[in-house]
Amino acid sequence: MRRGLFLGGLRYAVKVEVQLPAILRARKMKLPIFIVDAFTAKAFRGNPAAVCLLENKLDEDVHQKIAREMNLSETAFIRKLNPTDNFTQSSCFGLRWFTPASEVPLCGHATLASAAVLFYKIKNVNNTLTFVTLSGELKARRAEDGIILDLPLYPAHPQDFHEVEDLIKTAIGDTLVQDIRYSPDTRKLLVRLSDTYKRSFLENLKVNTQDLLQVENTGKVKGLILTLKGEPGGQTQTFDFYSRYFAPWVGVAEDPVTDLCTCVYCSIMYQSREMEATQVMDGSYACGSAHAVLSSYWSQQLGKKDMHAFQCSRRGGELEISLCPDGRVDIKGGTAIVLEGTLTA
């Protein structure tokens, strides 16, 4: 800036350089951010996810810092793929998911939350959105009573009990186990509890997640799915199967509603229907990624392509599942946008 200086009646122009502190010179980052409860039509239920809209590229480490700050099971980042794209008119975006601890290759409920933000808050004009992700292209389309996700279907294969005995004992103690499957694509271990148990047993089961990291540290297992066959209908709503999902290996003690598990579960239920219960001698959201596994399993076991699932976490969550001929699965759920704001840093 310039200031006037008078010497002997004459005015001289003096240039003064003002050096601002670095913290004031740095450009403030402002990101639109939302919190969405997925797989529910009611606020404060289902599985919450944070959703960030990125107009510009973020430094790699900032994604993880934001996810850690939000401290939800997942934070989703939607980015434009081309400079001319906009969030209202474009139909294809990049999408990444981060837990508070790390980036993950797939998260169904945060994908559902991302589509909800674009459809309902940004007023995107398209009926179908495509997200380019680490798991390939995922599509989300409008439905009358929710949003339908098109997700990959992950098979789960028989798993020898003795190889995972310590993990199961640590998690659920002497709980009776009916079947054990493993999904190598997702590194999820699916444990089906005995059919003698009811939904209330799974809901109230105390699962020890604190010691799982010490028991399983090989990297083979990154998520534990506990599941139970549904009960006959009566006065309560009928569900084909129930589940809970735990992923302390990626910083999520229990996920509210998980879709990737569901996809493995449905495929196995369709092929094999009879299992023998085995006693294990010696363990709060709906997760779409887990249901990508669960759908595969339960479809084979039940001989059904269309199923209704409930995740028995503290917040609960409902999912409608339809296996597709192309080896994928449609998972429909509702959403409730509970927070809208601006993230500054």
Image (tube, rainbow, N blue to C red):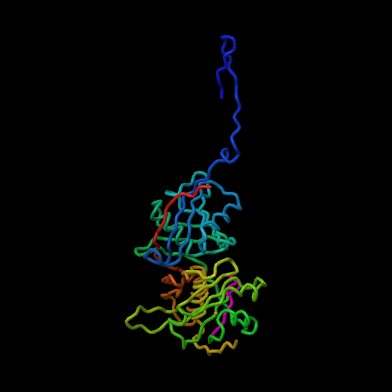
User: Is residue 25 shown above or below 163?
Assistant: above
Please provide the residue range marked out in magenta: 178-188
Residue 290 percent coordinates (x, y) = 51, 71
- Answer left or right for 8 relative to 309: right
| Quadrant of the rendering where the N terminus is positioned | top right
Kindly report the secondary structure that dominates the magenta region of the rendered protein. Answer: strand
The residue lying furthest to the top in this view is 9
Residue 162 percent coordinates (x, y) = 64, 84
Residue sitting at 48 percent across and 79 percent down? 298
User: Is residue 181 shown above or below 128?
Assistant: below
Foreground: 122 or 271? 122
The residue lying furthest to the left in this view is 235
Residue 302 percent coordinates (x, y) = 46, 82
Q: Residue 173's image quarter?
A: bottom right
Q: Does the magenta stretch include residue 156?
A: no
Residue 258 percent coordinates (x, y) = 49, 69
Q: Residue 97's image quarter?
A: bottom right
User: Is residue 5 shown above or below 124?
Assistant: above
- Residue 144 visible at all: yes
Residue sitting at 54 percent across and 84 percent down? 179
